[in-house]
Amino acid sequence: MSLKPSDVYVGFWIDWSKSHPILGATITLPSNVGALLVAFLALFVSLAATYLWNLLAFAIHYHRQHLTQGKCHPLLRQQQVIFKSGLQATSSLFRLGGLFWVNRSTSLSLKYSWLPILLASSCVTLTTVAGLYSSRIFDSSSQMELLLRSPWCGALAFPESTGDELILSGNQFSEILSLARFYSQECYNATAGKDCNSLTSQNINWATNWLAECPFDKGMCLGPATQLDTGRINSNVILGINSPLQDQIDLRKITTCAPITQDNYTMKLTNATVLASFGYYNPNDEYVAYTYGSSQDPGNTNVTTVSSTMVANMTFTRTLGTYTYYENDTEPVFFPIPKLNISNGDGVLFFIQNNGIRFLEPCDDPVFGAHIKHSVPTQNSTVYYTSDRLAGVIGCSEQYQFCVTSDDSSCSSLGGLLGTLQAVRAMPLTSPQRATMATLTDALIFTQLGSIMSDPRNFLAQKRMISETQLPIPSNQWQIELWGWHAATMAAFQYRLIQQRLLEGVISGSSELLTITPEERAFCSGQRVRSSAVSGFTNISALSFFLVLFLGTILIVTGLFLDRVVGMISPVKQGVWVNDNALHLQRLAYMNQERVGGKEVSTWADIDKDIPRVEGETLLGPLVEPKIDTMSSESRLSQRYVKLPQQDLDNMSS
């Protein structure tokens, strides 16, 4: 079953498997668009982090202004310049650290440095974490889930009987059977491979009771039965039918099987009429009839199936026959004997023939048993074994139960599929719940045990065959096979839920989609699969994405306008903040240099704003270190006057 990019829904949707709708808010985009958003968000987070540090720097600068009103430690003034510099947190951290290091011998260096360095380090760490988190907002892994959306959804209807119904249904079933065979054998085990990530849940788990009671009359079972109980399978979390809690349905399936006794239920058959109804009759052949019930074929009263000794000896592969009967079936095609009737479940009989397969060792399995010894003199007296009986028989019961997920008291009784559905119809379900039920029911009808195991290629014992020779198999092979059958049934059920949504290419001129309710139509875009089934998409956590955008926007906008707002409230402190700007420090340096050099001082405008400017066409030369040794006393006094407060000049005069 191949999925195309056009089968995937692109846009906003809610993943209801999450604990809350807000957490499940998801945006699915093509991978190329997702890559652009990843790049954008990385730049946005970096910009927001810069403004976060700028806000911290502004707060520290603002808080320390009372320390720098008069004379203060030089380290404080240098730090104030760093806070106003507009550098990123990383650069500021290195400068603050370097400033502390070169002043480490002074007594107040640690006191004034530890908090700014700690805040800068925290901001760098927070920026790194935010960057890593922002990358996790985007999911392009094979484990992410996508939502299928297809207009070709539902079941097929055939207004005219043309035979296409059987052909198309057969094609759908063959596809499901092939997928289920591979998936159950490769993925329903502890060592599942890389091709097992296409479904919402890799497998459907079940509990096994190896000593269960016989599902039929106790005298019909050879030893204890084996029971496989799935427990409650949630339609949303496990099956991927994307719906809120109030619309979810839980399904439970119990399969109980046991080898069936053949004592008093087999006989040699010579009736030509009955044999002809099974396609047999050769006077030189021996036929064994199994009398577990009858079909509606004329003349074969109480005969279930017939095995030919001659055909079996000439066939070197396994063959399989299945007979299914249903609880509350108004038009049955098989009538089991009373001892095989099941009052609260459906039944199925498997007739497994080993035919002419040669076993290298005796087999004690009650179904696959082989103890008839043979030797081949022309092959160095090779010994092999053939089956004890023409066929081994396994009988199974299948029971179903449906529950409303949000109401544990609203459950049907365990029973056969038809009987359970009749009970469900009487339950007070909402329209979405009935739509979920309809989806599950179609998949169950399509994937019952008797249908899925109609192909002998599904036998796990086939994996231990070389040509017509059976390598040793254990004495509980029938239980191993049952495990594989159940796994194949569950895998087919999972795949059928997807196949219901993807009928494009299946519909022919003589078929059309069944009319479905609006609620059922909603489920056409309500099936989740993992991205390994179809590549080329990226999921975005809507909550995380918009949260990052919201918080980042707040930081950026606040960083852009906070100093202006503070300036309107406290113009003096705002002036100190502005004067520590590198451009204003440059202005002061030029004015000081011009005064010391006896030159005409340039006229500066906008000195109360972040960016001062020189009026007119004045040209500025480079800033140079003052040559103190060659200065005149007047120049020195002038420089001292510029740099020192008035009290220092008074001291010098005295």
Image: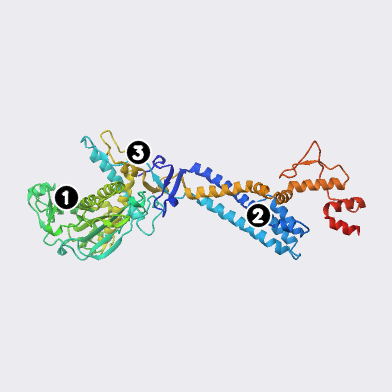
Q: Residue 335 at x, y = what percent?
A: 13, 52
Query: Residue 593 vs residue 146: left or right?
Result: right
Q: Nearer the viewer, residue 288 or 20?
A: 20
Sequence-first disc among 2 and 3: 2
Q: Is residue 256 visible?
A: yes
Q: Amino acid at mark 1?
A: Asp
Mark closer to the chain start, 3 or 1: 3
Quarter placement of the C terminus: bottom right
- Position of 245 compared to 215: left or right? right
Tag 3: Cα neighbours inside 10 Å, few (<14), some, or many (≥20)? few
Q: Which residue is mark 2?
A: 59
At 56% from the left edge and 52% from the top edge, which residue is drawn? Answer: 131
Looking at the rendered structure, the secondary structure element under dot 3 is: loop
Q: Residue at x 10, y 49 (%)?
A: 275
Residue 221: x %, y % from top left: 18, 63
Task: Write the residue at 71% across / 64% down.
Answer: 110
Query: What residue did someone put label 3 on?
Result: 151
Q: Secondary structure at mark 2?
A: helix
Q: Nearer the viewer, residue 654 or 53?
A: 654
Residue that mark 1 sits on: 329
